[in-house]
Amino acid sequence: MSENNYLELDYLALIAKMVLKYKYRTYELMRLKKGDRVLDVGCGPATDTITLASLVGETGQVFGVDIDEQQIMHANQKAVDAGVNKLAIHYLVNGYQLPFEADYFDSVRSERVFQHNVDSNQLLKEMIRVTKCGGWIVVLDTDWSTMSIDTNLVDIEQKIKKIHVEKTFKNSFAGRQLFRMLIESGLHDVYVEMVPIFATDYRISRQATCLDMAEKSALEAGVISQFELDALHADLEKADSEGKYFSAVLQMLVVGRKPFVQKLT
């Protein structure tokens, strides 16, 4: 992940592979059927929109939006390569102001996007606005405070995690907030599934958790010393070489249905 918090393509590909089965679970919870019109908020390089296009079929349509121009360029090219560019359409758009009419989509999804936004309430409000009454909103996001790495140097690991939560993401607690947010937004049939993500490969874990950024922030803040960081690296590398490395973090998959009759406010 780059300094400006945009996500790189190799990072997105790695995470997509790690959470593949949960991606398909989000599709199931969208209750997709042929002919549906659906939206993926924070679509990245068409990681999900191509698959969604196959699920809604030739009579359906998939829209993806993202704020990163590079991601949209890749998404549109992938749609062309897959032969679904008329079914899967991607826009360079801020999720706070979606360019769609109210009640436009049969279902809307978002995956690991709220953690990168400072105004999650506005993002969710827009997702609900463009969803048809009776349609489903599906959101998957991370609670980075749950991240843990098995190490003998727990104090150092905890110091880095604290900085990680404070500095790396705009909203590190996004996952835990989703249930409350969907309830407060007036959605019905709100449902939660816990999604545990773990790694037993040190290199993959470092990339997936953006650990380099957290360590850099911890050093710059004076929370840990270079000596402590070197000791932690040695401990984790030893565990990895012995096939004992383990790290984990929790994501929350939360689903709600837009009511058929909206309350007047």
Image (spheres, grey):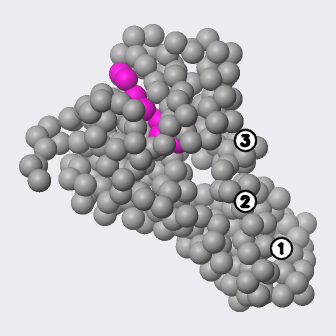
Seen from the viewer's position, the closer of residues 263 and 82 is 263
Tag shown at residue 3:
2
Instruction: Please state the horizontal and vertical placement of residue 50, each as a whole percent of the image.
Output: 57, 24
Is label 1 in a helix, a strand or a loop? helix
Seen from the viewer's position, the closer of residues 65 and 30 is 65
Q: Work out how far the residue at label 2 is from the one at label 3, CA to CA, in angstroms.
A: 14 Å
Q: Is residue 151 visible?
A: no
Instruction: Please state the horizontal and vertical placement of residue 67, each as a whole percent of the image.
Output: 56, 42
Q: Work out how far the residue at label 1 is from the one at label 2, CA to CA, in angstroms.
A: 25 Å
Disc 1 target residue: 236
Instruction: Please state the horizontal and vertical placement of residue 214, each as a whole percent of the image.
Output: 72, 71
Of the numbered discs 1 and 3, the one sitting upstream in the chain is 3
Seen from the viewer's position, the closer of residues 123 and 196 is 123
Of the numbered discs 2 and 3, the one sitting upstream in the chain is 2
Residue at point 42%, 59% (across, down): 119
- Looking at the rendered structure, the kind of residue marked 2 is Glu
Question: Residues in magenta?
Answer: 36-43
